[in-house]
Image (cartoon, grey):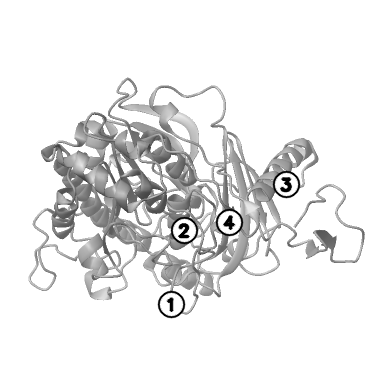
Amino acid sequence: MDMGIHVVIYQCLMLIGLSCLPILSYGRSNPRNVLVIIGDDVGFETSIYNNTVCKTPNLERLAKRSVTLKHGYTSVSSCSPSRSAIMTGLPSHQNGIYGLYGGVHHFHAFDNVKTLPVILRPHGIKTGIIGKKHVGPPEVFKYDYEKTEFNLPMLQCARNITKMKGFVREFFAMNESMPFLLYIGFNDCHRCPESKFGDFCEKFGNGQPEYGVIPDWKPAYYDPKDVIVPPFLPDTPATRGDIANQYTSMSRLDAGIGMLLDELKSHGYLDNTLILYSADNGIPFPNAKTNLYESGMGEPFLVSSPFETSRWGEVSESLASTTDILPTVLEWFDIPFPSYKLNGATVALTGKSLLPLAKQDPSSGFDHVFSSHNFHEVYMYYPMRVMRNKQYRLIHNLNYMAPYPIATDLYDNPTFKDILNHTLSKQPTKWFKTLEQYYYRDEYELYDVVDDPLETNNLAHQEDYADIFEEMHDTLYKWRLATNDYWKCYPEGVRYKNTCADLDNAPPYQKYVNPV
């Protein structure tokens, strides 16, 4: 008897009361696998997004087998909340991970949230995670195979691509006849908490005696004068040096992409594995990470389907979100999203499968995305709700009377310190905005991202854009209701007797009367 049948029988016995038919449909006759690759604080500093300086040949290899999304977006520009959205298909304000998981903050998902590994397990699909995880509680995000920062040093499980290669091989060797979901969380290009390795841990494993060796990585080095400074950053020597180190870190992630492609090929999985590549949030620079401007919300995004090759190497103009990853995986495996409730409300996915993009850009359905943010760390409270369509971005800053809080790694870096020091000494910062403009924001920000890519001209209160504002505001609010947003009455009102009551004791909102 085929070993795959033994596995199926065993699983059926272990899952008494559950149908075995979905398991039987994924035997050797219909092999399908998924590889999800998430970079840490990674942006568009790659050759696949037309950066002519930062060389990423392995991402180019993957792009030749993929549709490259020009408009990919994160659901939230902060690590744990973003990863929770990827694994649950739900925005962080719905799944419960409002900020960074663990530590004194104690942000964690609701106990009954259904995650990718939990949904897939009853269907006979083995699941594994290698690298950065940063979500919890453990039982809610439980994979069959785990090599993460929870049982290994982060540098070894998420930046040492040679060790990661060994973990990939261990995972492939488990129950070889079973289809799989493998989630890879690279720690590049996050800033480095261990300063001896450089701002981006770019020295870790570079072959020098004090930094060790990663055999599968030959570091690439860049002259600061050659790097490309994004327009949302000041073009200064400090920024250029910062970016040069970021590029070196990116070279290690790119080598890791090559390692994964090679392992898939050598194990015979390359031609039956869906590959999804993206990142958790914007790059760790001002105006990007933790922000929901284009520079913080925009993400690299590749969709590689081995069964739809007609669009390989093409660029898609469709808008996609990291909340689309879960429904994409479920459609790939032909598994329905489970019916369940969170806090008394039935859960429905607002993301959608990206598999249609492997054939063509649909005429409708991929023309807008949503994003939200509540916390980074617990004292960095700045809730935002955002809608981005093909021309405009509407940001609702719910805590707009407070200064925008700065995450530790976004404060303690050469680029931002240079801005601070030049501001203090009343010298030009070469930045496109002032610190005061950065810290203090209007409640509503509406930008024409096509004609105003730096988002400097707020159209929210301009009469000519009233209809656009109203339509986007209405759509955004309906999404907040659909996702059971606990902030839906904030900041104008308070949750009161199954509705939103006005803080000035006026009658409940007339436009958005809704059950709480």
Inspect this view and state whether residue 269 appears: yes
Q: Give the residue type at disc 4.
A: Gln
CA gap, disc 4 and disc 2? 21 Å
Mark 2, residue position:
289
Mark 1, residue position:
103
Which of the two discs, 4 and 2, labels the residue nearer the N terminus? 4
Residue 310 in the image, given as x and y percentages of width and height? 32, 20
Q: Which of marks 3 and 4 is in front?
A: 4
Q: Residues within 10 Å of mark 4 (few under 14, many from 20)?
A: many
Mark 3, residue position:
460
Q: Give the residue type at disc 3.
A: Ala
- Depth check: give the residue in front, 426 or 260: 260
CA gap, disc 1 and disc 4? 21 Å
Residue 189 in the image, given as x and y percentages of width and height? 32, 57
Do the CB atoms of the residues marked 4 and 2 lie less than 8 Å apart?
A: no
On screen, residue 334 above or below 113:
above
Q: Give the residue type at disc 2.
A: Lys
Residue plotted at (19% across, 48% down): 175
Which of the two discs, 3 and 4, labels the residue nearer the N terminus? 4
Q: Residues within 10 Å of mark 2 (few under 14, many from 20)?
A: many
- Depth check: give the residue in front, 28 or 13: 13
Q: Give the residue type at disc 1.
A: Gly
Which of the two discs, 3 and 2, labels the residue nearer the N terminus? 2
**Secondary structure state at the residue bearing disc 1:** loop
Q: Which of marks 3 and 1 is in front?
A: 1
Do the CB atoms of the residues marked 3 and 1 lie less than 8 Å apart?
A: no
Which of the two discs, 3 and 1, labels the residue nearer the N terminus? 1
The image's mark for residue 94 is 4
